[in-house]
Image (cartoon, grey):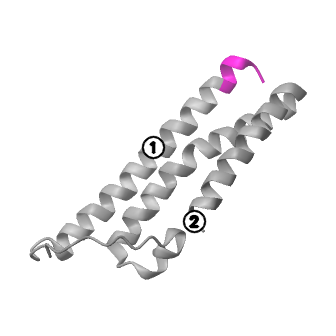
Amino acid sequence: MTDDRMDQIIGQLLRAGVILAAAVVLAGGVWYLATAGEKLPAYRPFHPDVQGIHALSTLPHPQALILLGLLILIATPVARVVFSLIAFAIEGDRLYVGFTLTVLAILLYSLGTSWL
């Protein structure tokens, strides 16, 4: 695999992830406005309830769809790192495999600890 081909695939992967995430968030936003758009907002003190990934099962469906779109957006750069890891492993470039594994470990650690 050439560097140019790898760059093209990574670009397509990132573009597809962002477009998919935007479409899912847009669909969730339209659904939310269609079902709850006429309700008056409740202006009260905001007390955030951080639930992480578990919120997908507890939120109303339109809001869960918006959250899913945001998770797809977060997963897009992670997928890029995984693809790079595979490409470097196929090329036999041990140094970049090591760097990419380190970046992937940091990403997964950051994502994992934020959901605890």
- Where is 9 relative to 48, above or below? above
At x 47%, y 74%, the residue is: 56
**Looking at the image, which residue sits at the far bottom?**
58
Q: Badge 1 is on which residue?
A: 18
Q: Badge 2 is on which residue?
A: 115
Other residues around mark 1 within 10 Å, as few (<14) / some (14–19) / many (≥20)? many
Q: Position of residue 99 (x, y in %)?
A: 78, 31
Q: Earlier in the sequence, mark 2 or mark 1?
A: 1
Residue 47 appearing in the image: yes
Q: Dot 1: what SS? A: helix
Q: Where is the C terminus found, in terms of image quarters?
A: bottom right
Nearest the viewer among 7 and 110 is 110
Q: Position of residue 76 (x, y in %)?
A: 55, 45
Disc 2 versus disc 1: nearer the observer: 2
Q: Where is the N terminus found, in terms of image quarters?
A: top right
Q: Quadrant of residue 62?
A: bottom left
Magenta residues span 1-6
Q: Quadrant of residue 67?
A: bottom left
